[in-house]
Image (cartoon, helix red, strand yellow):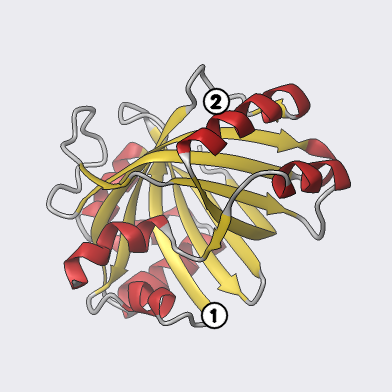
Amino acid sequence: MIDQNVITRVEKKYEINVFTAMSLKNILCKTLVQDSYNKDDGYMVRSLYFDTLYNNDYFDKEDGLEYRRKIRLRTYDPKAQFLKLELKQKEGEYQHKYSLTIPKSIAQRLIEGHYEVLKELNNDFADRLYTIMQTNLYRPKCIVEYNRLAYIVKENNTRITIDSDLKSSESNIDIFNPSLSLNPVTSKTILEVKYNNFLLSYVKDIIDSVNKSQTSASKYCMSRFISYL
């Protein structure tokens, strides 16, 4: 199964405290549609990020470059037999996310550095990733894991997510390990608002009603920042 998807949208990020997060959850549960993955307390998101030999993607983000990218493998269950291979590109205000669903066997080969396996997929996006990762000497760098609650507005493909319990590891990159040892990164809760073109007025009113501070920090950079102190 090789499924490809492309999403273009605006993404806004905010830091909120635990009390604001609880209040917001109560409001969103009553007004928006819950993501099908949601359990009572959300669901796990685990990503393995790749970066160049000299960590160009990390520094491009830290330096605030307008055009930058991130490459990652993502799973919602370490025992899953399929993962998402994703490329996120920031271009001005917009984020472009290209994703490909790949089997675990191919994901394992990528982790081992055998990027030529992408050429076997007969897929334009896979070919593009192969060129990027091979030419720029990409390597697996960091696992990032957190708990997510997600809510949906179907009318204009809006997603609101509340992410907490952010943890990471640079020493162990076994994304398939169900008992992976991870280090806490921050006690902050991250609110993300992702939408196409505009927010519906009632959704904007909900977001505007909570105490928050806008941030540009990415979970990947937050997780690797300690390495550069």
Q: Is residue 114 visible?
A: no
Which residue does the image show at 46% across and 28% down from the upper left?
Answer: 43
Position of residue 107 measured from the top left corner of the image (x, y, whole percent): 32, 46
Quarter residue 133 falls in: bottom left
Q: Nearer the viewer, residue 44 or 86?
A: 44
Q: Residues within 10 Å of mark 2 (few under 14, many from 20)?
A: few
In the image, what residue type sits under mark 1? Tyr
Position of residue 50 measured from the top left corner of the image (x, y, whole percent): 31, 62
Which residue does the image show at 49% across and 82% down from the upper left?
Answer: 65
Badge 2 element: loop
Q: Is residue 155 visible?
A: yes
Q: Which residue is mark 1?
A: 67
Position of residue 181 measured from the top left corner of the image (x, y, whole percent): 16, 37
Left or right: where 149 falls relative to 129: right
Q: Indicate whether 16 appears above or below 94.
A: above
Q: Earlier in the sequence, mark 1 or mark 2?
A: 2
Left or right: where 58 falls relative to 1: left
Q: Which mark is residue 37?
A: 2
Q: Indicate whether 191 appears above or below 91.
A: above
Q: Residues within 10 Å of mark 1 (few under 14, many from 20)?
A: some
Q: Indicate whether 98 appears above or below 169.
A: below
Which residue does the image show at 67% across and 43% down from the upper left?
Answer: 159
Position of residue 182 measured from the top left corner of the image (x, y, whole percent): 20, 41
Which residue does the image show at 21% across and 33% down from the upper left?
Answer: 177
Q: Which mark is residue 97?
A: none
Quarter residue 153 falls in: top right
Q: Nearer the viewer, residue 97 or 18?
A: 18
Left or right: where 171 falls relative to 95: left
Q: Indicate whether 100 appears above or below 98.
A: above
In the image, what residue type sits under mark 2? Tyr
Say whether marks 1 and 2 touch (CB < 8 Å): no
Q: Nearer the viewer, residue 162 or 143?
A: 162
